[in-house]
Image (spheres, rainbow, N blue to C red):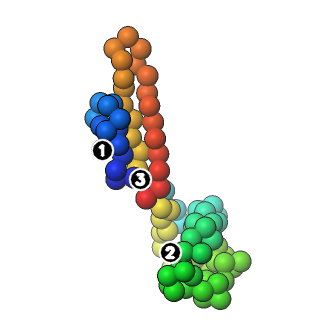
Amino acid sequence: MGMKLCGTFLAAGLPAPHLRYEAAIGTGPEWAGYEVLAGVVRDLLPVLQNFGIATTEDIRIETLAARLREEVASAGGVARLPALVSAWTRIGMSYPRKTSVTNRI
């Protein structure tokens, strides 16, 4: 939904939202994001297989986090988690409620 949040808010009759686009980044062997990235790939594995992009043998999911950690850390690199788009708006005049929706892209 990410980039469609503005239109969704407007279609729901809400005021135009404030939007943010964020992605966590990290580096080094201690960063917990490698496990998160491996989890994202694990969740997408059926799609990757259905479209013939990769097989379970190609990805070796059980060692993916460790391999990402080793490659990024040994190269002094930086890894990025999937970006998140969030939107919020205020409704009503007497009580400034905040409505928030966040989705992965």
Answer whether residue 53 is visible to the viewer in this image. yes
Residue 53 location in percent, x, y?
A: 50, 84
Query: Is 46 on the left-hand or right-hand side of 53?
Result: right
5 up-or-down from 13: above or below: below
Q: CA distance from mark 1 to mark 2?
A: 40 Å
Camera-nearest residue between 5 and 69? 5
Q: Amino acid at mark 2?
A: Gly
Foreground mark, 1 or 2?
Answer: 1
Which dot marks residue 76? 2
Q: Residue furthest top?
A: 94
Residue at 34% from the left image edge and 14% from the top image edge? 93
Camera-nearest residue between 89 and 50? 50
92 up-or-down from 89: above or below: above
Answer whether residue 38 is visible to the viewer in this image. no
Query: Is 4 on the left-hand or right-hand side of 44?
Result: left
Residue corresponding to mark 1: 7
Q: Quadrant of the C terminus?
A: bottom left
Query: Is 31 on the left-hand or right-hand side of 51?
Result: right
